[in-house]
Amino acid sequence: MVTATAAIEIRPPFAGRELLAFLSHRAVAGVERVDESGYQRTVALTHGPGMIRVELAELSDDAGRRVLTATLHTSDPADLDHAAALCRRLVDADADPTGIDAKLAADPNLAPSVARTPGLRMPGAADGAEILFRALWGQQVSVAAARTALARLTMQLGEKLDEPLAGLTHLFPTPAAIAGLGADGIAGPRRRAETIASAARDLADGSLDLNPGRPVRDVVADLVRRPGIGPWTAGYLAMRWLGDSDVLLSGDLALRQGAARVGLPSTPAALSAHSRRWQPYRSYAGLHLWRAAAGRTAPGG
């Protein structure tokens, strides 16, 4: 493999450890690895498999810029720019944390959380199809259960690397590989299995297009018209893959629990109405509410 480093410029503040914690909680064995300072994963690039690592614990100085250091391993040097772009997407490098925090802190219910964890970033993704499958496999099960199921799937269907690094051995399975299982080969509730198999077939043949260059509303509309894919799944993909800064998953139970913990309305309709004051940064408000639900930003916590 070809190895190179890249400096990813980041506007402070940057809540890197919170981003690490989010990714660690969802890391799929064989594909992803998180340690105390960084995040590493395998990626499918244009000319072959690769691997990326980003040091997230803190920003470094580079000629007056604040940067994160990324290490890129690619099968072909032509893929280095692609790998660096994936690193930028993963760490939400284009976010304006000062503007986001100022908007959210104007709400007294969110202000304490913003003060405790300034610079929260939306955890990005390396591939849209992967995020869709993660969301679908995660329906009605815990994050840990979904992670275990996806690790098994990866060992079964993911391409094995010729040169494993740091315990990472496989690429996440392709839509074509998952489609080959059919609904009968996918464990879990029948309806969910049919939804996954159908989405995999459509992604494999191109009839479902998750290209981030498309308008977000078009991708979301394509998703929610499919049986078994609702607003939560489409919204989650819009945040993590399409970079939509203004999604509020008001039907999400944990998010609504977090809202209640910080004194906000916790019914979907009332929370949606209240959230208009956070536009266009409702996706980031949701990160604060998820943290509140976990007890990390609750009053006195």
Image (cartoon, rainbow, N blue to C red):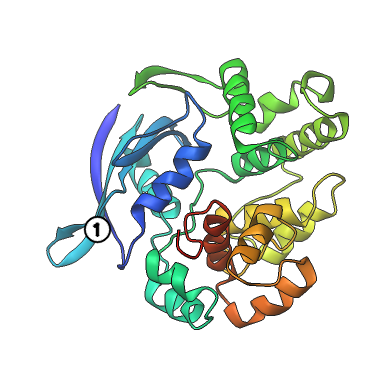
Say whether residue 220 is left or right of residue 23.
Answer: right
Say whether residue 70 is left or right of residue 190.
Answer: left
Q: Quadrant of the C terminus?
A: bottom left
Residue 215 percent location from the top left of the image: 65, 65
On screen, 300 above or below 42? below
Residue 285 percent location from the top left of the image: 55, 68
Say whether residue 245 is left or right of residue 33.
Answer: right
State the residue in front, 217 or 271. 271
On screen, 57 above or below 218? above
Extreme residue in the left direction: 63
State the residue in front, 273 or 65. 273
The amino acid type found where label 1 is placed reads: Val
Q: Residue at coordinates 75% horizontally, 59% vertically from top-left?
A: 251
On screen, 54 above or below 255? above
Q: Is residue 241 visible?
A: no
Q: Residue at coordinates 61% horizontally, 37% vertically from top-left?
A: 143
Residue 150 percent location from the top left of the image: 61, 28
